[in-house]
Amino acid sequence: MLNLIIDRVGSVNVFNILDTSGSGSESHLQSTIDEDLILEYIKEIENLVRVSNAVNSKGMNHKTLETEILHELKILGETFYDQFFPAPIQEKLRLTTEKYLHLNIDPKLGVIPWELLHDGTCFLSDKFFIGKTVRGESSQNVFKEKEKLRMLIVADPTEDLEWAQKEGEQLFRVLSEKVSSSRLEIEFIGGRQVTKLKLLSLIKGKNIIHYSGHLYFSDDPLENGWQISESKILKAREIKNSGFNTDLVFSNSCQSNSNASRTLNSDLMNNFAGAVRYQKFYWD
């Protein structure tokens, strides 16, 4: 795994990278990039996402337009990649054979859609499974060493993803067998049991939430959410209003990575509920 720590002081970014494979680390590398360039990049990406979503929502099948959007995403992502990362970091990301990248970033950089950065060969989301921790978003709950952890497993609420149901059941079984109930309290819910009101009540007070199912995407990040039974959507704004405050959200979701523009919206979901850590993986 590559662990990339990024701090930001003024317009200067400071990078420390740790390669857990033992192939070497780099420290205190720097780049300078003004905030207006960061904001312009985000604005351009959001514009492309709006165009893509407008086409998809109307049921249009414009392969040429989709190809052009993907090409524009590549150009923007590669340009920003070259501006943001110092040369040694660029080379490390291009040449590494690691499959996992964890970003530990300054809160001022939390809005960057990292998955859409392009190294000249591919988008980072095509090369890595990406996890992100935004520093300074610590939970209000101070966890004590001997305190019991509370976990919620949500599996296949739409009842059309067999792998999601199996994953949830297997995770519940393994954790129940391997971890003492005095250390970990697990609740499992799946299928039609997953209603909006039920889920909103269950997510409160949980240290860990594991979700396997479909994600719903919108131009507005607060309208993003989890697809549940009866074609309903548990939206980010509803989760936010519930007082949701957890330490780790693990989202294993069904999405095609071939449509890179959708990845931006998934990145915005990192911010929808104030989780200290939000890990996400995708299935085609």
Image (tube, rainbow, N blue to C red):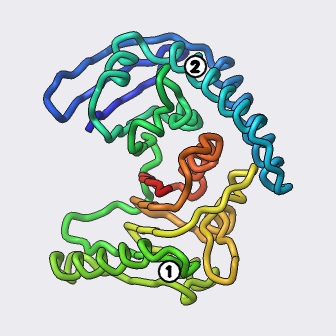
Instruction: Determine contact: label 1, label 2, CB under 8 Å.
Output: no
Give the residue displayed 29% in from the left and 26% down from the top: 96
Looking at numbered disc 2 in the image, what kind of residue is underneath it?
Phe
Quarter of the image where the N terminus is located = top left
Give the residue number, with chain letter if any, for mark 1. 202
Q: CA distance from mark 1 to mark 2?
A: 40 Å
Which secondary structure lies at badge 1?
Answer: helix
Left or right of 115 on screen, residue 15? left
Left or right of 192 on screen, residue 169? left
Does residue 105 lie above or below 130 as drawn?
above
Give the residue displayed 82% in from the left and 47% down from the top: 55
Name the foreground residue: 64 vs 280. 64
Give the residue displayed 35% in from the left and 30% down from the top: 5
Name the foreground residue: 73 vs 43. 73
Give the residue number, with chain letter if any, for mark 2. 80
In the displayed image of the protein, which residue is found farthest to the right? 58
Does residue 284 lie above or below 263 as drawn?
below
Mark sitting earlier along the chain (1/2): 2
Q: How many marks?
A: 2
Which secondary structure lies at badge 2?
Answer: helix
The mark lying in front, picked from 1 and 2, is: 2
In the displayed image of the protein, which residue is found farthest to the bottom? 193
Q: Position of residue 236 (x, y in %)?
A: 65, 62
Name the foreground residue: 202 vs 92. 92
10 Å neighbourhood of mark 2: few (<14), some, or many (≥20)? some
Looking at numbered disc 1 in the image, what kind of residue is underneath it?
Leu
Q: Quadrant of residue 225?
A: bottom right
Q: Position of residue 199 (x, y in %)?
A: 56, 79
Q: Position of residue 125 (x, y in %)?
A: 47, 39
